[in-house]
Amino acid sequence: MSKIGIIIQREFNQRVRKKSFIITTILTPILMIGLIAAPILIAMAGSSDEKTIVVVDESGVIAGRLQDGGKLRFRKTDKSAEELRRNREENVFGYLAVGKDIVTNPSDITLYSYEPSTMEVERNIASQVEDIIENIRLQAYNIENLPQIMADVRADVSLSTYRIDEEGQDKASSSVLSYGVAYVFGFLIYLFVFIYGGMVMQGVVEEKSSKVLELMVSSVKPFQLMLGKILGIAAVALTQFFIWMVLLFVFGTVLGSLVMPDPDTLREAAQGATMGMDVSGMTGNLNPETMEIIRNVTDLSYLAKLFGGFVIFFIGGYLLYAAMFAAVGSAVDNVADTQQLQLPISMPLILSIIVLINAMNDPNGKLAFWFSLIPFTSPIIMMARIPYGVPFWQLAVSVLLLYGSFVGMVWVAGKIYRVGIFMYGKKPTLKEVVKWARYKN
């Protein structure tokens, strides 16, 4: 164990002291926040160009009711559609041809554009015309005060959701939060396993090509060397993850202080909402869905369940796949030759991402259940289920199978590693690697 500890320390120090580790540790949270914020900012900014659409209205009921907005400007014209087609006007996006029977036939409308149209433009036009036609049809019934009646009967439902646990207690839940957390945590495990598993494989290949391994195995057993390398890089991963969580927590705290009510008010509101009280005056413009999210993210047991599950399944998934990546790295002489042997390892991870969406939509379905127990897919799929709530026995079985598979895989990978690190000048096939695993000690 002391030899394994020395190897762990060496792997940890060698990577943590690199400039690349410091740079990626600082830049990754910034890039993640940027990737989340960029689409929102771009969508908010949109296009700065206003688009003018000339309306040829044969029905006489549409053009006068179209409202400018959304960077669209409508202008009625007496010209025919044929004239506009032959003689293009300056600074005009296109023209809208409205037929005579638009009220009875809503499809009797066509947009002709002089440049490529967009979904936003078409949705704006279609939505306005639909509202106009509906209002005209309603007015045909000659109902007095119809606009006021329609305004009075319109309802805006804000659904609060609670989950009843096994003890009969109801707890506030948020499907939006569960969906987002499931995707983020599942994808992070997928990403981390690939990154750090690949780091193990690359480290083995580099040491093998520099003949360092031949010197090291004169003092330690190949199995000890492989296990020390895997655990050392796992320590690097956990250190980096811990730093990221601290940075994100600090950022979230600062951002929350700018956009949220003060903490005392927020806690009182969360407690009051849980007890069924009206807290709208305490929380300003926060809607019920936002309040449910706040109740969950301020619940220490909920946070402990999420981050505890992430650490357990990340470590298990990493150890399982790192053993296989180490075996692949020991079997080849350079990184380019790993592609063929790496494919069987990558397939379960890719399959997990495909099943991840199904698991988020139906966390208790058969597909999500079985894939959350299979060790090669459980780290990702179980993290997609945990935010929704998973029975303890399923968690226990999944963890036991995952870590039991890791022990078995380390034993198999150790046999491949023992043979592979001394093989040079030949690119082994998958069949030969399996043969190495079957060698007796």
Image: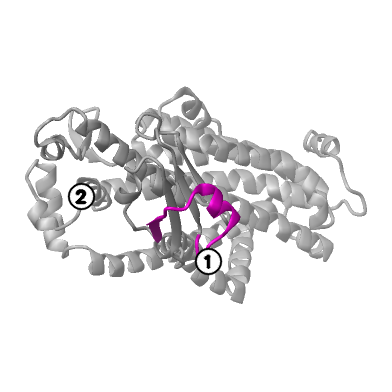
Q: Quadrant of the C terminus?
A: top right
In the drawing, what numbered circle is on residue 287?
A: 2
Label 2, label 1: how far apart the Cα atoms are? 46 Å
In this rendering, would 60 be left or right of 441? left
Q: Residue at x 9, y 48 (%)?
A: 272
Q: Residue at x 39, y 56 (%)?
A: 74
Q: How is the image coloured?
A: one colour
Q: Image quarter for residue 416?
A: top right
Q: Is 150 located above or below residue 205 in the figure? A: above
Measured from the top left, where is residue 87 in percent x and y? 57, 58
Q: Residue at x 28, y 42 (%)?
A: 174
In this rendering, would 261 be left or right of 92? left
In this rendering, would 100 be left or right of 196? left
State yes or no: discs 2 and 1 in contact (Cβ < 8 Å): no
Provide the residue span drawn in magenta.
Answer: 71-92
Measured from the top left, where is residue 83 in percent x and y? 54, 52
Residue 213 visible, this orientation? no
Q: Which residue is mark 1?
A: 90
Label 1 packing within 10 angstroms: few (<14), some (14-19), many (20+): few
Q: Amino acid at mark 1?
A: Glu
Q: Nearer the viewer, mark 2 or mark 1?
A: 1
Find numbered disc 2 in the image and state the secondary structure of the residue it sits on: loop
Q: Amino acid at mark 2?
A: Asn
Q: Image quarter for residue 237?
A: bottom right
Q: Is residue 79 magenta?
A: yes
In the drawing, what numbered circle is on residue 127?
A: none
Q: Earlier in the sequence, mark 2 or mark 1?
A: 1
Count of numbered circles on the image: 2
Residue 268 visible, this orientation? yes
